[in-house]
Image (cartoon, grey):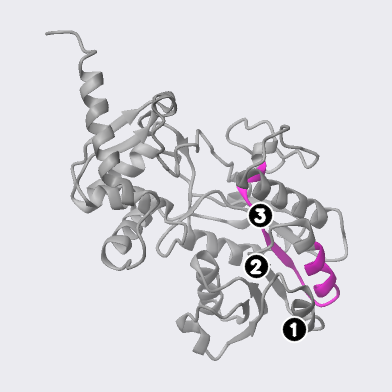
Amino acid sequence: MASILVIGGTTFFGKAIVEELLEAGHRVTVFSRGKKRPAFFDHERVSHVQGDRSDREGFREKLQGRAFDAVIDNIAYTADDVRHALDVFRGNVGRYVFTSSAAVYYTGSMVMPVPEGDVNHDFRPPQGAESPFWSYTMGKLQAERVLTSQSEVPYTILRPPVVLGPEDPTLRGYFYFQRLMDGRPLLLTNGGVQSFRLVYSRDLARGYLRVLEAERAEGQIYNLAQHEVVRLIDLVKEAANVLGQDPTIVSVPADAFRRSGFEYPEPYARMSNFIPDISKAEEELGYTSTPFVAWLGETVLWYRDAYKGPDSAGYERRDQEVAFAERFQELTGRLKPEP
């Protein structure tokens, strides 16, 4: 039985990590703001430290000097976050596991499948390319550099791509599921032909267990993702099959959206042919993934039967989406030669 601290363990895959750790028999300390209280808070092997990661002194006061076999840090987004964590845990932690992101591969060559080494830690975004995406990417990149440039705290870095599963607070998958459920036309940028690997939230959580169990994972970086490479259109069609829907899918070129001025907040539209190489995790950790059809079906049914939250992005403009789809079909239909 190990003693493990999870920083950010009450939501989505952080919650799943805690559940998997408990299932494996470990003692878990959860550091969170305490706004959510999962059922495991009452578990005899769970303790909770309430605090805000951004409160540096409070973080230090509540955690410094406490010994853990491992720390899983899910909510470090900057070099300062990691630097401060290393200072707090130095000498008192067996392994620091940092949740990075596959977004850092946008600094490399992007030759697919992309291996763990294809990252440029000296990368700088193009001038004028300020955006939330680049802020997030550079934050993770610089955080990794802090971690890999020191030797006092043993570490492992995990780089998941887009995570999907029940309880996903981003609602990115629900964007498609909700539109399929209403039975009206669904717009897909470029027909959804882009291919990618996602990662199922529960598989990702189990990956952390694999890392903690493997001594050879110390000082290593791993991609964790599903085994299958799928296209967005495959995801949509399989979700429709689970829902018993026969959807009307309207393929719209990205350039047509741009020229029309119609803003369509499709979340996976830019995930063009993004395929992390997971062979290292499979070979060194024995990592495996749940079949895509199985976990996607579970996720879709959870959103249909259990989800009670807000609508997905842009759903308040659903009527305009449908009108755009119908108009686009009408215009492109005129381009077809007469029989």
Q: Is residue 311 above or below residue 320?
A: below
The amino acid type found where label 1 is placed reads Lys
Residue 158 occupies which quadrant of the picture?
bottom right
> Few, some or many C-alpha atoms within 10 Å of disc 1 (few <14, some 14-19, many ≥20)?
some
> Few, some or many C-alpha atoms within 10 Å of disc 3 (few <14, some 14-19, many ≥20)?
many
The location of residue 230, given as percent across then percent down, is 41, 39
**Is residue 87 rendered magenta in the image?**
yes
Q: Nearer the viewer, mark 2 or mark 3?
A: 3
Which numbered circle lies on residue 213?
2
**Which of the two labelled residues, at mark 2 and mark 3, occupies the earlier sequence position?**
3
The location of residue 205, given as percent across then percent down, is 54, 64
Q: Which residue is mark 1?
A: 62
| Circles 2, 1 touching at the beta carbon (< 8 Å) | no
Q: Nearer the viewer, mark 2 or mark 1?
A: 1
Mark 3 and mark 1: span between their CA atoms? 24 Å
Q: Residue furthest top?
A: 338
Q: Which residue is mark 3?
A: 100
The amino acid type found where label 3 is placed reads Ser
* Location of the N terminus (image quadrant): bottom right
* Location of the C terminus (image quadrant): top left
The reply, left or right, for residue 98 in relation to residue 270 is right
The amino acid type found where label 2 is placed reads Glu
**Which of the two labelled residues, at mark 2 and mark 1, occupies the earlier sequence position?**
1
- Chain part drawn in magenta: 83-104
Residue 195 occupies which quadrant of the picture?
top left
The reply, left or right, for residue 318 in relation to residue 23 is left
Front residue of 332 and 225: 332
Q: In the structure shown, which secondary structural element does the residue marked by tag 3 occupy?
A: loop
